[in-house]
Amino acid sequence: MNSTIQTKKSSSLSVTVVRNQSPDIQPLSTQGSSGSKSTISVIYAAAVLGMEAEIVQVETHLTSGMVRFFLVGLPSRAVAESRDRVEAAIKSTGYAYPLGRITVNLAPANVYKESNGYDLPIAIGLLAMSKQISSEKLTSSLMMAELSLDGRLRPVHGVLAMAFEAKKAGLSFLVVARENAHEAALVPGIQVAAFGHLSELILWLNGIKELDQNTGFGEHPGRQSREDSLDFSQVKGHSLAKRGLEISAAGGHNVVLIGPPGSGKTMMARRFYSILPPLTKQEALEVLRVQSAAALLRAEQILNVDRPLRSPHHSASRSQLLGGGRLLRPGELSLAHNGILLLDEWPEFSKNVLESLRRPLEEGFVDLSWGNRTMRYPSKITLLATMNPSAKGTWYDPARVESPSLHEMKRYVSRISGPLWDRIELQIEVSSQELSFWNGTTQESSEDIAGRVAEARNRMTHRFAHRPLIHTNAQMDASELDRSCTISSGGEQLMKHAVEKLSLSTRAYVQILRVSRTIADLEGAPQVSAHHLAEAIQFRSLDRLKGVL
């Protein structure tokens, strides 16, 4: 047998293509079976359901009779149109399209199939059924890719979920288009077979071509470079607000900046991203799985991933924020998972939209429903909100005629319900007059603040080593609070006094404990002391404003 081997290299993958020159190795021709004889083949594919996937068996049946093609098993319109793409791709590759009565069943039949990636398993099923492919790899491979009319493999969405499911099912290979290779390679324990053309895949299945092992994939996602133009060293004054944002970044606590227009709220909110710690490998995979489910994942994002920052406009609808629709895609809340959800001027959002945040902020996930389908997406976020103290934009000042009244302030602030306020651990007042008290000293850079934040996060990681689902102090449950927030005797007296004077709810009490634990971690203190609690209480601005809430 004579053949030439040509190696083609791309920036992401080196693929060995075997070009057949021997007359004795040709695609086998197919004839319809006679009598009652029939042939069946089974190829494994996957149905992507949000962040999860389910194994789908592509069963292909051929029998004699009029040339017909039937596709059953609850396929979408895009899947139903695969017949013409598959036929053109097989013929363009130089193989024979089987003749006869063909039935393709996508099992289980009660799962809706909507991916264009079923082209590849259907094509391989037809070739295997017609004896043009004979390989043991078919029983240990999951295949998903769209086919072009000339046989090229095109990428599909949700490959990361497919890779996890293939590994869970005990399969050995995940066959995808070359563009999906980096995404599939994020999951260890399963071998990625990435190809650019249907002919390459057939040669590999028939044992003529070896799988290239030089993938060049990294072991885990990389980190995206920070934007140097946004740094806290550019923010003059506002030491209290900077301290509150440092605590929020360290412990993952929700925070709101309250101040008049021009006081610097949005300026500091935009720089909050620069002091966040890098994602852990597990957190990065969670972020990528959400982006994959939303069909937003690209190769450059896999190699450069950092904490997400989502900033929806105040006109955003409930479905845009939470997700939903017929395909049950994740919304802004889930796309901000393990990152920041920035709501600038959040009282301007619809009250119905804001109230829908209450449960996700408390539980860390969003449940979406459409028809008889239900899907759950994670939503462990740090909520960063900004707002004016009143509709006029200023605080109440009896010395100013144009200032809002206390009633006007109360009416504006009440756009945010009490239960939602209880889910905000840090309420920071930002004064427009603070710049006048700035003494001209050099301001701390984001790098300096981020260093302290990273040290505090490391202490949390060590403390929560026995609880892998807890990453920050903001995520501590009742049992972890009892274990980690031991308070000194002086601190207990201070908390009792604060609860009585400020009429704090139980949830607000718990929030103060979590914030004080973060302040102690920033200092490296093993126990929560009275001055930690005092600083945490200081950041409950609206609780201290009588007549407003």
Image: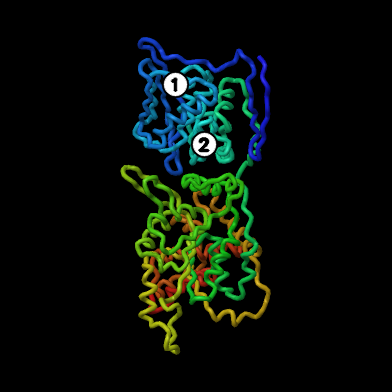
Left or right relative to 109: residue 489: right
Where residue 155 sits in the image (x, y, percent)? 53, 38
Where residue 451 sits in the image (x, y, percent)? 64, 61
Q: Residue furthest left?
A: 371
Question: Viewer-proximal residue, 239 or 472?
Answer: 239
Q: Residues within 10 Å of mark 1 (few under 14, many from 20)?
A: many
Where residue 502 sits in the image (x, y, percent)? 41, 74
Quadrant where the image shows the C terminus: bottom left
Q: Quick check: 115 above or below 454?
A: above
Residue drawn where x is 47% and y is 21% of the image: 97
Marker disc for residue 163: 2
Q: Quick check: 367 above or below 444?
A: above
Left or right relative to 19: residue 418: left
Q: Quick check: 534 above or below 100?
A: below
Q: Secondary structure at mark 1?
A: strand
Distance between the alpha carbons at the discs numbered 1 and 2:
23 Å
Question: Viewer-proximal residue, 1 or 400?
Answer: 1
Quadrant where the image shows the N terminus: top right
- Identify the amino acid type marked 1: Ser
Q: Residue furthest top?
A: 35
Q: Secondary structure at mark 2?
A: helix
Q: Which residue is mark 1?
A: 41
Q: Residues within 10 Å of mark 2 (few under 14, many from 20)?
A: many
- Identify the amino acid type marked 2: Ala
Mark 1 or mark 2, earlier in chain: 1
Residue drawn where x is 59% and y is 27% of the image: 200
